[in-house]
Amino acid sequence: MTAHILYILERFFEESAAFSVPIGGTSQLGETLQRGLEKFGGKLQLNAHVDEILIEDNRAVGVRLKNGNVVKARKAVVSNATPFDTVKLMPQKEGESKKLTKWRDDLGTLPRHGAISHLFLGVDATGLDLSHLEDPAHLIVQDWNRSMQDSQNLCSFFIPSLLDKSVCPEGKHVIHVYSSGGEPYEPWEKLTPGSEEYEEYKKERVEILFQAVEKAIPDIRDRLEFTIIGSPLAHEAFLRRDRGTYGMAWAAGSSAPQAGILGSVLPFPFPNLKTPVDGLLRCGDSCFPGIGTPSAAASGAIAANTMTHVDNHLKLLEEASKKDPIYKFLDPGFMGQVYRPLVQGFTPSAELRTERFATGAGVAPVDYTQKNAERDAAASS
Ligand SMILES: Cc1cc2nc3c(=O)[nH]c(=O)nc-3n(C[C@H](O)[C@H](O)[C@H](O)COP(=O)(O)OP(=O)(O)OC[C@H]3O[C@@H](n4cnc5c(N)ncnc54)[C@H](O)[C@@H]3O)c2cc1C
């Protein structure tokens, strides 16, 4: 559990608190983002494992995929992989700058949380009365005198089918149970997936997760129709997070290395998205503002904003503010006019400007409303 969560825990119990769950399941988040990306001319390529970030003259010029294909960067390369995984994509080269070597060493050795164990269950809900559950999500603490980082102490479970019946067949429930991000990775790395020892250890470590759900559904084991145990090795392989880590762990109140200029005046615990390589940015939950889907999304927005002209930010905010009265607060209004002349000389960020870039979308503000109208008109003609 991160400090952020402890800070907001009380708010979960406020009168107006609500769970935000994507109708149709988590895949809807990805599909919605994909629609947005494609609407603005982007292309999503799946099964495209990046093997190396290509750097020429201290500038990120593209990526080489595992299948050997090279994808050239038009503006910049943005890595959403954890810092531990990003540095592995940039093997040390002869003659590289000391700054880059230090950055790689700093990022690659940042303290990190442990891994996570998962239990994915599909259960028969015949005669199952869950009306005593006020919430679809629960945190179970075995012993308040033990650490919340202890994966055998803090467990969470979530029953999305309580909120959205479309995620499983009628008469069933789906449940995701998971440990804290403190599951030690070391015992797992010695095991071979599929071996008897591995299967036994999986069962041993998730026993506590079963016990957590039993607090709400005592006969859960009799109702099981489908079970998958996700070990830290699976977490590592499927989410491609080094050692299955939940994420970077930096104590609040001090700044992590590479936290940028603000890090010297404010206790910003997470590293900056900038790198010592021109045209290479990072985003994701190991960048400021931190762990969690809202924070990871914010870091993506910061990366995008770093690559474009401030007029585009302001235009986007203005457009969003008009979409619905609840977004009215986004209108930059008068403050936007004050802010614009102060920062326009810095946008996009200087190290991202190149001759190629000078004619691209980043330098001159782009009228996306106009561009979209033209595209829609062309499509309907
Ligand atoms: C069990 C669990 C419960 C959580 N609950 C919550 C919650 O309730 N609320 C909340 O806000 N947050 C929660 N979090 C945290 C949240 O999920 C993460 O902080 C967030 O998803 C991180 O997003 P990201 O984009 O930074 O990283 P990721 O989601 O890890 O995305 C990184 C992507 O990069 C890809 N990648 C890595 N290496 C390569 C490569 N070489 N080539 C190509 N692609 C690569 C990976 O495949 C992955 O798709 C939870 C996390 C877990 C594990």
Image: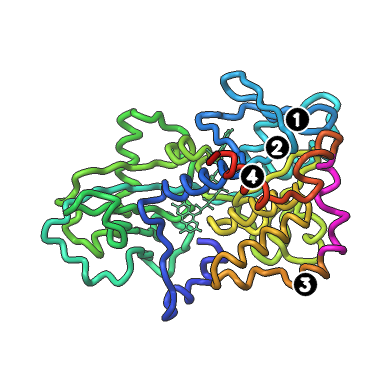
Mark 3 touches mark 1? (CB < 8 Å): no
For marks 2 and 4, give the one nearer the viewer. Answer: 4
The residue type indicated by label 2 comes to Val
Query: Is residue 350 within the magenta segment?
Result: yes
For marks 1 and 4, give the one nearer the viewer. Answer: 4
Question: Of callouts 1 and 4, which one flags the residue occurring earlier in the amino acid sequence?
Answer: 1
Question: Of callouts 3 and 1, which one flags the residue occurring earlier in the amino acid sequence?
Answer: 1
* Residue 61 disc label: 1
How far apart, in angstroms, are the residues tagged by discs 3 and 1?
36 Å
Q: Nearer the viewer, residue 274 or 255?
A: 274
In the image, farthest residue toward the top: 68
From the image, which quarter does the C terminus lie in?
Answer: top right
The residue type indicated by label 1 comes to Val
* Residue 335 disc label: 3
Judging by the rendered image, the residue that carries numbered circle 2 is 77
Q: Main secondary structure of the magenta part?
A: helix
The residue type indicated by label 3 comes to Met
Q: Secondary structure at mark 2?
A: strand
Q: Secondary structure at mark 3?
A: helix
Question: Of callouts 4 and 3, which one flags the residue occurring earlier in the amino acid sequence?
Answer: 3
Mark 4 touches mark 3? (CB < 8 Å): no
Question: Would you call the spot at circle 3 few (<14 residues within 10 Å), some (14-19), or many (20 or more)?
Answer: few
Q: Nearer the viewer, residue 169 or 43?
A: 43
Q: Secondary structure at mark 1?
A: strand
* Residue 374 disc label: 4
Q: Which residues are magenta?
A: 340-353
Q: Position of residue 96 (x, y in %)?
A: 83, 30
Q: Position of residue 158 (x, y in %)?
A: 34, 58
